[in-house]
Image (cartoon, rainbow, N blue to C red):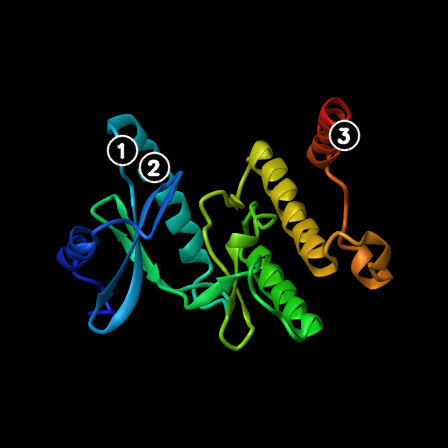
């Protein structure tokens, strides 16, 4: 059943019937299939025993992120983590922000900010929104966020390293939102939006490395 606990045998069938994965990623293979007429993606932990163990751990973390974000608009529905190796979610019919045409950018990025804000309110920082493929644009030009494999989840209690990592990733999400909205044209950023930006040490180091590389190979 798609609306209840799905049958693990159906998930295994989807993987077995896929001639090839729709996507091969660092977390494993992404298979596209159908259950009860509903299109789903199955992310499967694959590889040698060590690689598969690491990927299972990563998928468990991603599943925790999806559980926290249940019912947040703009986040695909997750149906569970099966057999300790299969993460199942809605197959989103959308295009990457890299390839999509957006006619009303103010509305789109306003909606995207609302998703990021709601995500942070649930204690999840995506951490990889600079990558445009993790922001999808659906048929009605609404944003959807996918691939929470690099996410950081806020932990209650005394977890100082988690606090540092979470604040870094949350700020990275906001910086990515601004970069995409203004297409790196920082001179166009409004004062209202500028308050969400803060340059991170990692960004500064990356910029210096890029400049050095261009100087050597320019």
Q: Residue at x 74, y 22 (%)?
A: 216
The residue indicated by pointer 2 is 55
Q: Which of marks 1 and 3 is nearer the N terminus?
A: 1
Number of numbered markers: 3
Q: Are marks 1 and 2 in contact (CB under 8 Å)?
A: yes
Q: Which residue is drawn at 41% across and 66% down?
A: 92
Q: Is mark 1 on a helix, strand or loop?
A: loop
User: Label 2: few (<14), some or many (≥20) within 10 Å?
Assistant: many
Question: How far across and down, in percent of the image, does residue 168 sit?
Answer: 65, 40
Label 2: which secondary element: helix
Give how far across and how far down residue 53 sits, in percent.
Answer: 29, 32
Identify the residue at horizontal 27%, vertical 38% (top origin). 46
The tag earlier along the polypeptide, 3 or 2, is: 2
Mark 1 touching mark 3, by CB under 8 A? no
Relative to 80, is 83 on the left or the right? left
In the rendered view, would you say 204 is above or below 41?
A: above
Q: Mark 1 points at which residue?
A: 47
Please identify the quadrant where the N terminus is shown.
bottom left
Q: Mark 3 points at which residue?
A: 211
Gap in angstroms between the C-alphas marked 1 and 2: 9 Å
Tags 3 and 2 touching, CB below 8 Å:
no
- Examine the rendered structure and indicate whether residue 110 appears above or below residue 173: below
Instruction: Residue lying at the far front in this picture: please name it.
Output: 218
Residue 102 location, quadrant: bottom right
Element under disc 3: helix
Image x and y of residue 201, in percent:
73, 33
Q: Quadrant of residue 193?
A: bottom right
């Amino acid at each position: 059943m798609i609306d209840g606990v799905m049958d693990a045998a159906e998930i295994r069938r989807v993987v077995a019937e896929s001639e090839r994965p729709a996507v091969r990623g660092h977390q494993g293979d992404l298979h596209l299939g159908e259950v009860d007429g509903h299109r789903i993606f199955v992310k499967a932990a694959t590889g040698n025993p060590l690689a598969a163990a690491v990927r299972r751990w990563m998928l468990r973390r991603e599943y925790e992120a999806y559980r926290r974000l249940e019912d947040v608009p703009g986040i695909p529905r997750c149906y569970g983590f099966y057999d300790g190796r299969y993460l199942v979610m809605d197959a989103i019919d959308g295009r990457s922000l890299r390839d999509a045409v957006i006619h009303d950018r103010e509305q789109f990025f306003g909606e995207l900010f609302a998703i990021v804000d709601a995500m942070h309110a649930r204690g999840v920082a995506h951490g990889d929104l600079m990558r445009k493929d993790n922001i999808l644009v659906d048929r009605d030009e609404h944003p959807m966020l996918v691939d929470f494999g690099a996410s950081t989840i806020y932990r209650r209690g005394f977890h100082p390293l988690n606090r540092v990592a979470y604040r870094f990733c949350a700020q990275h999400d906001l910086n990515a939102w601004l970069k995409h909205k203004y297409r790196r044209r920082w001179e166009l950023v409004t004062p209202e939006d500028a308050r969400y930006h803060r340059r991170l040490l990692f960004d500064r180091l990356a910029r210096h490395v890029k400049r050095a590389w261009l100087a050597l190979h320019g």
